[in-house]
Image: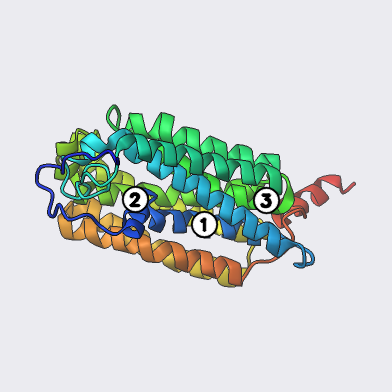
Amino acid sequence: MRQQLPAAPGTASSVPRPGIARAAELFKLRLVALVVVTTAVGFLMAHRGPWTGAWPRLALTLVGTALAAAGSMALNQTMEWRRDARMTRTCRRPIPAGALAPARARDAGLAVAAAGVALLAAAVNVLTAALALAVVLLYTLVYTPMKVRSPFCTLAGAVCGAIPPMMGWSAATGSLAPGALLLGGILFLWQIPHFLALAWLYRDDYRRGGFRMLPILDPSGALTGRLAAIYALALVGVTLTVSLAGMAGTVFAMGALLLGGWLAAVAARLAASRGQAEARRLFLATLAYLPLLLALMLADRRTAPSQPVPVLARAAAVNQMP
């Protein structure tokens, strides 16, 4: 007989959701889709040469990554379901809503995450599998417990989100190069204004759940808004480095400058006014920014990543002149 949990107090509805919908929520498939997309971008930016054997490798990489990410999401909910039950935004998730027992969710998360890492190790390469394992461990053993202890949890979560494009790169090349770290840096910086805006919007909910997000410890919002603006501005410089490194061309540089300037301006408005409307605008702006930036990067990608970056190559040539 299936073990059930009582529905959480304040749950909008006790009617069980269809199995597919419950699985989508347990594994956070929308967030997994973002992880898959950023992994694919890393692979496509790194790969050079014929695509005949690359497509199967890409497909296996994305499946393995999706499984590892989905398992991490399930384990996260297994660890947080009591806190989720207190929050309006999360009380209808499968475990707090009583649709799924914590032990079943834990077992499913472990099995799916292990399958993803094993698939990457067997069908792609050990480096990519090691990066996937690092994400699972960081997400469950560092980021998740840190959310109730320190506002620096946002940085830990951003590290987890920065690794998937590096996994794509390592899957394509078997190694990590500066370009992989650059892509990871873009994802890291993007997540800070994104999550700070989200935490500001739901700060009362996070407070009820007992999470120590920065907007809860910063009730005026002054530090929250300032950090969102600083990281958004830093993102402009890092994205321009993609073109300076020869990974993309002038079209990308111009687009990245425009997109980054727009995002930084939206973040600056949050820093100035610290209102709900401005936080919502920043959150939505981050959602629009990332796919536009990545699409532009792929459309204008340039020289092979294994080649020296143009700026450094020119500097080396000058140093070798008599």
Q: Which numbered disc, 2 or 1, marks the residue closer to the eye?
A: 1
Q: Which residue is mark 1?
A: 36
What's the residue type where badge 2 is placed? Answer: Pro
Label 2 – label 3 distance at C-alpha: 29 Å
Residue at left offset 13%, top offset 49%: 11
Q: Looking at this rendering, what residue extends furthest in the right direction?
A: 322
Mark 1 vs 3, N-terminal side: 1
Report which quarter residue 215 is drawn in.
top left
Mark closest to the chain's N terminus, 2 or 3? 3
Q: Amino acid at mark 1?
A: Val
Up the image or down, 46 lies above or below 322; here it is below
Q: Which residue is mark 3?
A: 171
Question: Where does the N terminus fall, quadrant-wise?
Answer: top left
Q: Name the secondary structure under disc 2.
A: helix
In the image shown, does 295 or 237 lie closer to the viewer?
Answer: 295
* Residue indicated by mark 2: 193
- Kindly identify the residue that appears in the image at 79 percent across and 47 percent down: 316
Looking at marks 2 and 1 on the same chain, the residue that comes earlier in the sequence is marked by 1
Q: Residue furthest front?
A: 1
Q: Secondary structure at mark 3?
A: helix
Q: Position of residue 170 (x, y in %)?
A: 67, 48
